[in-house]
Image (cartoon, rainbow, N blue to C red):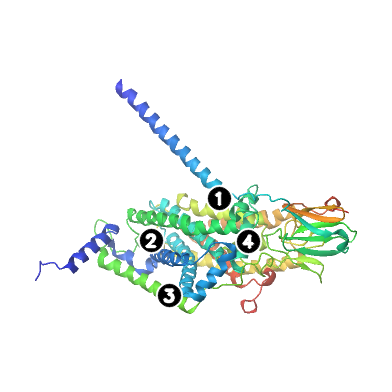
């Protein structure tokens, strides 16, 4: 009788230890994970908003680099604005604008993009990401807090003043 | 005067007792032949030790902050006596360690060293190999030069193609949207604390498991007594002297090389100016080469996953019961089939790389869903079919045992991947186009 009682109690205690052990491991993993997770950048007042300048200052069909904001401000031939992330969508290299050929040509793996950021040559899988552009009182402002992914260019992405 | 002990004798006794505490008293004579293992496991340990010593020295002069890191390396190189030498030693022994540990894995595989109760240790070895690659990769970023910055950009960009978790994983590896102070801090901590701890603990366990299994695999030509036990020799001096000789020769060779060839240091990292071509560290260039040919999902996720799965599953496939093992490539027929597999891969891989380059040039890469099939499903399914057919043919036509056939497939795939890596290192120039090494 006594023997029958001891065995289930032992196995219960064993199971309990195992459960506590697993829980402790999980907690440890959680703590490590929360340390490794990218920290959110504290939003400084207007820090993510880049004032590009007066909209008249950009000629139609021009590309202007903003190294500090890590984007290109593109004014299309029809006068609309696009802000293109300079990171290649293939593996994240910085893409320079090549004025002579009129395309963004990635030096790393030969991807190429047109003025609107659409893919001209693979291996890039999608067009260059966008940043939100707004025009207030004739001043172009670009919000560089989060790049916007897209699968192709369409007219709704263009901001007009 | 025999029987009287001097202090020297006593010290010798203490040392040899300690050595014998770590190592067995007797070892099989045939297993200590240098060409049986080429001392690759021991060399890895020596290199890890050398890396710990040189790394600890470098830590004294290095500042892990983006604005300071590059300047601190320059100061180390310019102002510290032996600064360039110690950094070169660390750099070259880290590269050599990736190579030696990789060759060690191949040696264990090709002598059947994952069989007979060594399955767990094979897995531990795989974890150690991954830890070595991770150590080397996290260290690659620390000089904060152009080479480091763009190599890490490329590799973390590859992680972004993992389905669903991709951008989260890339963010985790970068410590944010872009490589910056958080990335450098995290990599420094991983490189100098976490990974070394894992390596030392894992290596201790790894060596202990080898001893538990009765030492390294004994070759079949060992002289055996009537009970089948292989002829033994004393560890001290026979094996210890060989090990010491290998360790000293290795240290001398790495030191000489580091004294003559400096570790590279490019211009400081410039996030606005990508290198052309931008390449990952050499041990990841096989995957970067795959990226040229396959859809990213297949190059970065499917193929590496299949490869890792095959390596992990190798000891559990149930092959190798009552089959020859211990000798290089298992047996006479094993050597024959391995040569055949290597020859096929040596011919086929360059042909496929060149043909695909021509194909890409003529038609361009397919986009979207079509690419998933033509540059993913189709080539990978073809490769798997070739392996399956090859296995059957090796078994029926070449008289291979199951283990020999699996080994031949392993040789085939490993040779192919090695050639892709070499293509990435030497035959890819600006814009990742194929070039001759002397034109690059």
Q: Which residue is mark 1?
A: A36
Q: Sequence order check: which comes first, mark 3 or mark 4?
A: 4
> In 3D space, how far apart are the residues under numbered discs 4 and 1 (Cα atoms)?
18 Å
The chain holding disc 3 is B
Q: Which residue is mark 2?
A: B326
* Picture coordinates of residue B16, whole percent (x, y): 24, 63
Q: Which residue is mark 4?
A: B153
> In 3D space, how far apart are the residues under numbered discs 2 and 4 (Cα atoms)?
43 Å
Quadrant including the C terminus of chain B: bottom right
For mark 1, give the secondary structure.
Answer: helix
- Nearest to viewer (mark 2 / mark 4): 4
Circles 1, 3 touching at the beta carbon (< 8 Å): no
Q: Relative to A80, is B277 above or below? A: below
Say left or right for B54 vs B414.
left
The chain holding disc 2 is B
Q: Sequence order check: which comes first, mark 2 or mark 4?
A: 4
Circles 4, 1 touching at the beta carbon (< 8 Å): no
Q: Which residue is mark 3?
A: B255
Residue lying furthest top: A1
Q: Is residue B48 visible?
A: yes
Q: Are marks 3 and 4 on the same chain?
A: yes
Q: Sequence order check: which comes first, mark 2 or mark 3?
A: 3
């Amino acid at each position: 009788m006594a023997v029958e009682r001891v065995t289930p109690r032992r196995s219960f205690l064993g199971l309990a230890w195992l459960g506590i052990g697993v829980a402790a491991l999980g907690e440890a993993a959680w703590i490590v994970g929360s340390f490794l997770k990218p920290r959110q950048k504290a939003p400084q007042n207007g820090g993510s908003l880049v004032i590009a300048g007066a909209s008249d200052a950009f000629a139609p069909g021009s590309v202007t680099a903003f190294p500090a904001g890590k984007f290109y401000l593109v004014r299309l031939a029809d006068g609309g604005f696009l802000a293109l992330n300079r990171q290649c969508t293939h593996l994240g290299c910085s893409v320079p604008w090549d004025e002579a050929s009129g395309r963004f040509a990635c030096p790393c793996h030969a991807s190429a993009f047109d003025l609107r950021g659409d893919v001209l040559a693979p291996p890039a899988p999608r067009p260059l990401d966008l940043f939100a552009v707004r025009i207030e009182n004739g001043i172009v402002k670009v919000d560089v807090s989060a790049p916007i992914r897209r699968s192709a260019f369409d007219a709704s992405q263009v901001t007009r003043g | 005067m025999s029987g009287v002990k001097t202090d020297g004798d006593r010290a010798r006794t203490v040392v040899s007792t300690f050595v014998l505490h770590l190592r067995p008293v007797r070892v099989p004579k045939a297993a200590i032949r240098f060409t049986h293992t080429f001392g690759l496991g021991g060399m890895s340990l020596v290199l890890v030790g050398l890396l710990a010593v040189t790394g600890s020295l470098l830590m004294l002069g290095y500042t892990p902050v983006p604005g300071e890191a590059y300047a601190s390396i320059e100061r180390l190189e310019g102002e510290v006596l032996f600064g360039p030498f110690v950094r070169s030693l660390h750099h070259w022994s880290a590269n050599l360690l990736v190579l030696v540990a990789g060759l060690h894995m191949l040696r264990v595989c090709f002598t059947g060293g994952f069989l007979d109760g060594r399955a767990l240790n094979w897995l531990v070895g795989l974890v150690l190999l991954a830890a070595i690659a991770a150590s080397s990769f996290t260290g690659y970023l620390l000089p904060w030069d152009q080479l480091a910055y763009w190599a890490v950009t490329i590799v973390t960009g590859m992680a972004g193609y993992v389905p669903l978790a991709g951008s989260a994983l890339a963010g985790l590896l970068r410590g944010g949207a872009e490589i910056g102070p958080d990335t450098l801090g995290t990599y420094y901590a991983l490189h100098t604390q976490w990974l070394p701890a894992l390596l030392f603990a894992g290596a201790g366990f790894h060596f202990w498991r080898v001893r538990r299994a009765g030492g390294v695999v004994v070759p079949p030509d060992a002289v055996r007594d009537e009970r089948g036990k292989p002829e033994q020799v004393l560890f001290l001096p026979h094996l210890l002297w060989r090990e010491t000789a290998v360790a000293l020769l290795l240290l001398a060779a790495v030191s000489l090389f580091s004294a003559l060839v400096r570790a590279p240091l490019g211009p400081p990292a410039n996030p606005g100016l990508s290198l052309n071509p931008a390449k990952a560290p050499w041990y990841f260039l096989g995957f970067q080469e795959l990226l040229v040919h396959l859809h990213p999902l297949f190059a970065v996720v499917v193929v590496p996953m299949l490869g890792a799965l095959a390596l992990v599953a190798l000891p559990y496939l149930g092959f190798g019961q009552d089959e020859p093992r211990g000798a290089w490539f298992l047996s006479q027929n094993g050597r024959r089939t391995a040569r055949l597999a290597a020859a096929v891969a040596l011919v086929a891989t360059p042909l496929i790389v060149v043909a695909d380059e021509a194909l890409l040039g003529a038609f361009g890469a397919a986009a979207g869903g079509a690419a998933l099939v033509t540059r993913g499903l189709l080539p990978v399914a073809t490769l798997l079919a070739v392996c399956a057919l090859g296995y059957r043919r090796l078994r029926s036509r070449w008289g291979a045992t199951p283990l020999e056939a699996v080994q031949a497939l392993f040789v085939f795939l490993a040779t192919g991947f090695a050639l892709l890596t070499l293509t990435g290192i030497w035959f890819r120039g600006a814009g990742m186009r194929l070039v001759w090494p002397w034109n690059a």
